[in-house]
Amino acid sequence: MEGLGDLFTTDLFRSGVRLGTPIILAALGGGLCHQAGVLNLALEGKMLLGSFVGILAAFYLGSSTLGAVVAGLAGGVMGAIFAFLYLRYQVNLIILAIAINLFIAEMTVFFMRTFLGDVGTWSDPSIQQLPDIPLPIIDRIPVLGQMLSGYNIVVYFSWAAALAMYFVLFHTRFGRHVRAVGENQQAAEAVGINVPRVKVFALVISGVLCGIGGAFLSVGHLTLFTRNMTNGRGWIGLTAALFGQNHPFAVFFAGGFFGLADAFAVRLQTTTDVPPSLVQFIPQVLALLALILVALRVQVRVALARRAFRRRAQREIAAQEAL
Amino acid sequence: MKSRLRSRLFDQLVIPVLAILSGLVLASVFVWMAGTNPLTAYADMFSTAFSCEAFERCDLFTTLQLATPLMLTGLSAVVAFRSGLFSLGQEGQLMLGGMMAAWLGYAIQLPPVIHPLFAMAAAMLIGGLYGLIPGILKVKLGVNEIISTIVLNNIANLFVTYLINFPLRADQSTTAHSHPILDSARMLPLAPGSKFGIGFFIAILAMLVVTLYLWRTSPGYEERMSGQAPFFARYGGVPHQGAAIRGMFLSGMLGGLAGAIQALGVHYRMLSGFSGGLGFDGLTAAILGQVHPVGTTVVAIFFAGLRQGAQVGLQFTSRVPRELGGGIIALMILFVAADQIYRANLDRLSSLWNRLRRRPAVREAA
């Protein structure tokens, strides 16, 4: 069993956190949109845009941190375009997302090959990876310090984003409005909530989160950009969002879980003969099960409510007859 | 009556054509940025996509071969959309169908013609069964089919990756692939120089069958009815749940068939990167083709031509990266989805025109 013990180390946890960060950021973005009643399938494209813009900005501005910031802005602008087309011209969200995903996937490569030399992967020695920052106090705690400290700024940002999203959604007036729009748009409109504003907010913030998540891949994890760099992480983020029921903390841990599964798969591939895709399988199947369980819960609730209603009606009829 | 005909014509023809033109115009900015004259680049692109120099060297055949899987995944999307389910599951069905056909292609021994037919039937069955999952989940439990099909795509993709990397792996080459299929299972190309073969005609046949089924049979009518107006369907006594589930089974079958044709007629095996977005391309062809089998087929051929033309015409002749082809497709989809832009402006134009025309008449009356 010694071999198995070696697999679960702080190293594994750390690589899980690193692999999980872009997924978490995308998932938080997706979860926020779902809370506001917008199905955002363009996470993948916005992430890829963030990867591309992030590394270019890091190269031209000479700072990876600025690169990540610019990537976030680019994602936000993309989210704003998305919101404009959706709200102004009633473009179908799903079709719009498919078009944007395809456009970004192809045009990032187009621009890379047109302006950065005819290459499939672009990098420059001057680009620095995002520096790792030790956390002041936690760093000194023996095991916890090794697990939670010494990541780059984007990792901490993803933690802060989950906290901030929780606070805004559940402890502010505006957050209640967001959830009200997601719950029942007509009702929210009727009580005077500015529905378009809520949707624009959700789409722009989700774009920012995805952009930064994408930049994490190109300047935080590696220092290069390559064709289809996100490789389905946006879709996995979407799955994590629904696995976590769009609740910020649950989404955060769901994304982390996907990251850990990835790290575990990589570890298995290098140390054993166990197929890595089987490990990556588990979160996907769990997500599907979660979907089914949530639907079942809704059905059971409806059935119970109906039964209670029927019972009460019968009782009232009986009471009237007794009179 | 006349105006209704005109508005139908407007919806089905004018908007797609305007969207295609807008996409090309906007993309020409990118061509110009790449340092090439857009007009010559487009001329190169379309002439290589749809021309035929000789029977042995025919770019049109390559285009039609590339269009075949898009036509089938597009038809799969049409059937699902018409039954009221926005299924994005073509990708997963294609992967599983391709895997099934590739496996049966070498695992069993059958006489030549029967072998591919059998493999195709099995691929359609597995695709159909895989399509049933989101259908049943949607109808019985109300699970959002968009999300469930995305997860199911991931699962199918991981499963096939596992199969071709471990149990069914042929050799230790860098890209994992399964054993090549037997000669008896291969659908050989009709013309040398491309993989254009019987698969294209199967796709055309599928288009005819889907059109007849949806518009000329009562089960098809039930499906369209339960897709278009579920309450009306229920009021009229149509078993709309069964119709939706049947629609998903058919949709899955078409997705599986697309995979089988790729495995038996193009790659002769299952390999990593088998799909490469064929499912989404087919889906977008269905949307641009106004969710109609004939329109979808036309758009699928057009898309394949854009990709082929971008590869050969743009990249080899004009030195413009071939990714522009996909970019143009994306812009066209965007413009089709944003049809309100045209509608609003065309309405304004026509009212302006009417006012200009009426003015002299008013003056005469005065």
Image (cartoon, coloured by chain):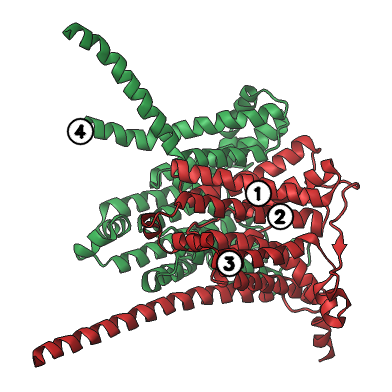
Chain colours: A red, B green
According to the image, label 3 marks what residue?
A: A241
Could you tell me which residue is drawn at 22 percent across and 8 percent down?
Answer: B363
Q: CA distance from mark 2 to mark 4?
A: 54 Å
Q: CA distance from mark 1 to mark 4?
A: 47 Å
Residue B241 position within the rendered picture, expressed as x and y whole percent measured from the top left: 31, 68
Residue A15 position within the rendered picture, expressed as x and y whole percent measured from the top left: 79, 70
According to the image, label 2 marks what residue?
A: A212
Q: Are marks 1 and 3 on the same chain?
A: yes
Type of amino acid under label 4: Met
Residue B1 position within the rendered picture, expressed as x and y whole percent measured from the top left: 20, 33
Instruction: Find residue B1 and name its label.
Output: 4
Type of amino acid under label 2: Ile
Q: Earlier in the sequence, mark 2 or mark 1?
A: 1
Circle 1 sits in a helix, a strand or a loop, which is it? helix
Label 3 CA crowd tier, 10 Å (few <14, some 14–19, many 20+): many
Label 4 CA crowd tier, 10 Å (few <14, some 14–19, many 20+): few
The chain letter for the residue carrying disc 1 is A
Q: Are marks 1 and 4 on the same chain?
A: no
Q: CA distance from mark 3 to mark 4?
A: 49 Å
According to the image, label 1 marks what residue?
A: A75
Could you tell me which residue is drawn at 71 percent across and 37 percent down?
Answer: B321
The chain letter for the residue carrying disc 2 is A
Q: Earlier in the sequence, mark 1 or mark 3?
A: 1
